[in-house]
Image: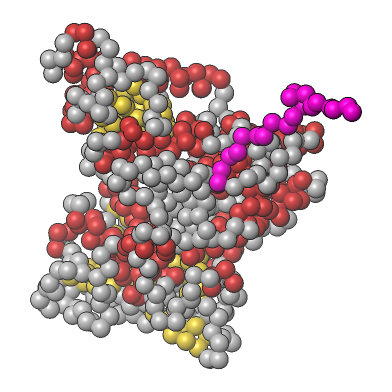
């Protein structure tokens, strides 16, 4: 009898298991997959997504200097606090990076997110006082500013031309060694909440890198997906789309499911997986663990508010959080459509029927809808304007939420890019930014016409913004918001012709170039460095009809404006005054978003109702003379009503008649 003994070398070793499920495919890449990946790299190069060696070395040099600077400061502060010389010599201190730079996917000219980690005897107040002063003395540091009262406190500055956002965390350790690993949960013990928040960025970034099977394939795929998301107008956590960390986690999950695939295959599989994903099932990179530190974590079994999150993508580091709580029914619908479109384009590319450049063609947002809301934010000085648009942009998702809860609106799609106003049609001293929201009205069944009143939706949004500005003492004379309803054929009054004209069938190159024309002067907190290489047009002047006094009219071609004006001797109509919604959409994370009667359900937008042809009839309040009102007297929802003969903010009414057969 003969026995065959298998050599241990011939036994198949089980591959390391990534993620919460086994891989979908372990197939190795073919030669053609490498070829497609090389072509993908070539298609991304014109967009400035890759830094050259010189720029990379410059960043490393700056971070090295900053790290030494921190150690020097901690030694000085330790001496001031009378630590013994033996302790001072090994007290340490370290700079950690996180975000796109740490992931290895930063673009040319991008900033660096960094964290200063200090031992227990260094206080947060030391960081914002003595370290801030030390930075101020450094000749290579410019544009230094501290934001101490932010949700995550930060010092911002430029170091030898590189923008840096520096957070601070004080650990419960006597010294900070150079080989410190922040991934262990025990490091969070006995820390205050601001330190935990500051550490979170580093811990999440490190965990993502740890949980992917091949870092280089992950990085190249993530570069492609981030470029695609920015080009398609769906990269903005603030406006209810996804931010950088969320896109990174979706790409990481794709890498876990196809651990041996190269970037070209992974981009295709990304669209395959997420075009079929059944939201709101969460995306998890690892099984959540409880570290018994009693920190709040995302868990819909325990927290009722977590059950209402529409597109949960859960950070892998404790305490686990949903990075997409800003997503609304409209933004989820738009992103789901983009996943499906991305799948169809990558199918064509991998069949040899299209080039990678097609994936990065921007959509023509201004041809997509028949109706738009134009949101205009203006201020009298550049400094006030930058502050004002920051607040307005952070609240636009409140307006989108208000609109999508209207029973006659199926979808509200905000374009993340903002556009400048035109000096010809406004006070030449004003600084103006405009955002555009595409609207799909629900098809009217069994009715000749229906009256739609958007006054409440827009009024409650403007109230939220003014109230917030008032509460943080930001509101200054000249700061104003206006919202206007316009039809597609009126957009030429606001935008350069190349953005609103129907595009003819042209080559990919000219299509990309024309889509960016006129947008280089835009001012947006979420503006991408990726667009800078193609923005060669200095920008066509844009008219801003919202700045003109509006006259009552029933002409269906006129935009109907609901503008916040200061009017005298007008008594408020109690019936039309908005009720207080203290935090707008932000409250939806603590409970179900309130729906209006007969409002479309969360699933309805995905069905994409055919846009009804609409005739617009405008009903406005009387024009009245304006007078000045001190900013502190602007009433909020909790303020008592002023006497009838005093000045107060009055908003004009805006009502639309939606006709079936017009």
Quarter of the image with the C terminus is bottom right
Q: Is residue 533 visible?
A: no
Quarter of the image with the N terminus is top right
Q: Quadrant of residue 4?
A: top right
Q: What colour scheme was applied to this rendering of the protein?
A: secondary structure
Task: Describe residue 533's horizontal placement relative to residue 380 as left or right.
Answer: right
Which residue is located at x 36 percent, y 72 percent? 594
Task: Describe residue 84's horizontal placement relative to residue 579 as left or right.
Answer: left
Q: Position of residue 376 (x, y in %)?
A: 38, 59
Which residue is located at x 40 percent, y 19 percent? 179
Which residue is located at x 57 percent, y 23 percent? 52
Q: Nearer the viewer, residue 662 or 150?
A: 150
Q: Is 227 rendered above or below residue 445?
A: above
Q: Nearer the viewer, residue 28 or 133?
A: 28
Residue span colored magenta: 1-20
Q: Residue furthest front?
A: 1
Q: Position of residue 80 (x, y in %)?
A: 13, 16
Secondary structure predominantly adopted by residues drawn in magenta:
loop
Which residue is located at x 56 percent, y 43 percent? 19
Does the segment drawn in magenta span residue 403?
A: no
Q: Position of residue 649 (x, y in %)?
A: 22, 69
Does the segment drawn in magenta span residue 18?
A: yes
Q: Position of residue 595 (x, y in %)?
A: 39, 75
Q: Is 324 rendered above or below residue 248?
A: below
Q: Give the total of numbered labels.
A: 0
Task: Describe residue 506's horizontal placement relative to residue 252 as left or right.
Answer: right
Q: Quadrant of residue 582?
A: bottom left
Q: Residue furthest right?
A: 1
Task: Describe residue 636's horizontal placement relative to residue 36 as left or right.
Answer: left
Q: Nearer the viewer, residue 451 or 379?
A: 451
Q: Is residue 31 visible?
A: yes
């Amino acid at each position: 009898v003969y026995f065959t003994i298998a050599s241990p070398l011939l036994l198949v070793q089980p591959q390391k298991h990534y993620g919460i499920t086994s891989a979908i495919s372990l197939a190795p890449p073919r030669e053609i997959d490498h070829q497609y990946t090389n072509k993908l790299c070539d298609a991304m190069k014109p967009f400035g997504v890759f830094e050259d060696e010189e720029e990379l070395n410059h960043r490393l040099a700056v971070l090295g200097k900053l790290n030494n600077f921190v150690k020097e400061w901690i030694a000085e502060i330790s001496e001031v606090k009378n630590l013994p010389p033996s302790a001072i010599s090994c007290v340490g201190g370290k700079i950690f990076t996180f975000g796109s730079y740490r992931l290895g996917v930063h673009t040319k000219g991008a900033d660096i997110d960094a964290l200063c980690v200090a031992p227990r005897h260094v206080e947060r107040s030391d960081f914002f006082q003595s370290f801030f002063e030390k930075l101020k003395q450094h000749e290579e540091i410019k544009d230094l500013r501290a934001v101490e009262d932010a949700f995550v406190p930060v010092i911002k500055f430029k170091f030898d031309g590189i923008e840096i956002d520096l957070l601070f965390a004080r650990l419960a350790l006597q010294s900070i060694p150079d080989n410190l690993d922040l991934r262990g949960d025990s490091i969070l013990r006995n820390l205050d909440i601001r330190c935990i928040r500051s550490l979170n960025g580093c811990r999440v970034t490190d965990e993502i890198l740890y949980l992917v099977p091949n870092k280089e394939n992950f990085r190249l795929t993530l570069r492609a997906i981030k470029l695609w998301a920015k080009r398609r107008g769906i990269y903005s956590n603030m406006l209810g789309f996804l931010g950088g960390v969320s896109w990174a986690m979706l790409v990481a999950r794709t890498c876990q499911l196809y651990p041996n695939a190269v970037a070209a295959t992974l981009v295709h599989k990304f669209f395959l997986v997420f075009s079929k994903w059944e939201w709101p099932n969460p995306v998890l990179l690892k099984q959540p663990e409880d570290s018994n530190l009693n920190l709040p974590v995302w868990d819909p079994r325990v927290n009722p508010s977590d059950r209402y999150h529409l597109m949960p993508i859960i950070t892998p580091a404790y305490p686990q959080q949903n990075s997409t709580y800003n997503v609304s029914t409209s933004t989820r619908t738009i992103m789901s459509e983009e996943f499906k479109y991305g799948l169809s384009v990558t199918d064509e590319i991998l069949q040899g029927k299209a080039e990678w450049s097609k994936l990065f063609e921007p959509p023509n947002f201004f041809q997509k809808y028949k109706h738009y809301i134009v949101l205009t934010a203006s201020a009298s000085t550049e400094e006030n304007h930058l502050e004002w648009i920051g607040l307005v942009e952070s609240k636009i998702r409140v307006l989108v939420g208000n609109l999508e809860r209207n029973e006659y609106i199926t979808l509200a799609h905000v374009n993340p890019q903002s556009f400048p106003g035109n000096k010809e049609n406004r006070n030449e001293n004003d600084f103006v930014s405009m955002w555009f929201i595409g609207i799909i009205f629900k098809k009217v069944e069994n009715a000749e016409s229906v009256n739609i009143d958007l006054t409440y939706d827009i009024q409650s949004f403007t109230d939220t913004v003014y109230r917030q500005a008032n509460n943080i003492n930001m509101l200054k004379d000249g700061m104003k918001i206006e919202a206007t309803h316009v039809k597609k054929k009126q957009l030429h009054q606001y935008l350069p012709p190349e953005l609103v004209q129907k595009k003819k069938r042209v080559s990919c190159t000219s299509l990309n170039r024309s889509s960016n024309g006129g947008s280089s002067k835009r001012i947006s907190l979420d503006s991408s460095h990726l667009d800078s290489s193609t923005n060669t047009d200095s920008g066509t002047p844009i008219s801003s009809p919202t700045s003109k006094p509006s006259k009552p009219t029933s002409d269906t071609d006129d935009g109907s404006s609901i503008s916040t004006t200061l009017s005298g001797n007008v008594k408020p109509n109690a019936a039309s005054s908005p009720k207080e919604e203290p935090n707008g959409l932000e409250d939806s994370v603590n409970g179900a978003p309130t729906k209006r009667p007969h409002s479309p359900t969360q699933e309805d937008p995905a069905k994409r109702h055919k846009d009804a042809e609409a005739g617009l009839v405008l009903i406005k309040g009387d024009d009245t003379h304006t007078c000045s009102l001190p900013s502190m007297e602007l009433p909020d929802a909790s303020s008592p009503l002023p006497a009838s003969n005093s000045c107060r903010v009055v908003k004009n009414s805006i009502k639309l008649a939606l006709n079936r057969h017009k």
